Image (cartoon, rainbow, N blue to C red):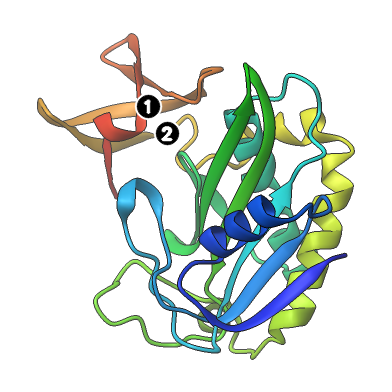
Amino acid sequence: MNIVKLHATTSTNDELKTRFRESKLPHLTTIYTIEQTQGKGQQGAKWISEKGKNLTFSILLSDLPLKITPFQINKLISVTIVEWLKIQLQIQARIKWPNDILSVQHKLAGILIENSFSGSQLSHAIVGIGLNVNQEVFDGLPKAISLRNLTGREFDLEELLISFLNMLENNLRNSSEVAQNYNNYLFKFNQSTSFQSKKGIFEGVVKGTDEEGKLILEVQNERLTFALKELKWIY
């Protein structure tokens, strides 16, 4: 594997995008950093990570199955993280739509995927992952948790990274089968929970996702779909 370790960078996604533009990089090239100063989350949010305590890394996916969609990549990555946590670390986790990883209802990891197209075909994707590992205190982030919080153990960051990349490489060979497990790990699947939309707070039963990646909720016996910016979880 082509793994590049940096002492510090603004954003591993931006760093990988720059290097990919400047030279040909092999599939699964990964950049990870000890310190990320301007980490990015969904919808312009910041990903805050204590220096040297967590895994912040980005992976180039350039050898993609034909006709794979952005949401299928999202499902593949999300499921891989959850199954890796379960198999390798014996940690139970769930996917909070669309791609936050929760354990004991606290955020353990986040994913930011940036896709590039050649015409209508997805040509490559840069997958940014932030995993809380050895950090113990999350000031101002009451919903955050780390592997150390969960287990009481301290982890070797590089060992975790290599272990995860090995599982991802294997899962990419069976990408469609892996992606089908998304609903099995979906947070609150077939359960009623509270949401907030522009119309206010309401109760809905999580029924899965459609092909475009919208969340399907059953609200008062009616099935409705919601895009990312239309809904906020309350839990």
User: Which residue is tagged 1?
Assistant: 205
Residue sitting at the far front: 22
Which of the labelled discs sits on residue 193, or is there none? none
Three-letter amino acid code at the position of disc 2 = Gln
Which structural element holds mark 2? Answer: loop
Which of the labelled discs sits on residue 191, or is there none? 2
Check contact, mark 1 vs mark 2: CB within 8 A.
yes
Using the image as rendered, state which of residue 160 and residue 19 is in the foreground: 19
Left or right of residue 204, residue 173 in this image? right
Residue at image coords 55%, 59%: 13
Left or right of residue 195, residue 182 in this image? right
Three-letter amino acid code at the position of disc 1 = Val
Using the image as rendered, state which of residue 198 and residue 66 is in the foreground: 66
Residue 76, percent from left and from top: 69, 40
Residue at image coords 65%, 30%: 72
Q: Is residue 11 above or below residue 64?
A: below
Q: CA distance from mark 1 to mark 2?
A: 5 Å
Residue at image coords 45%, 87%: 136
| Residue 75, picture quadrant | top right
Residue 30 shows in this picture:
yes
Residue 84, percent from left and from top: 74, 59
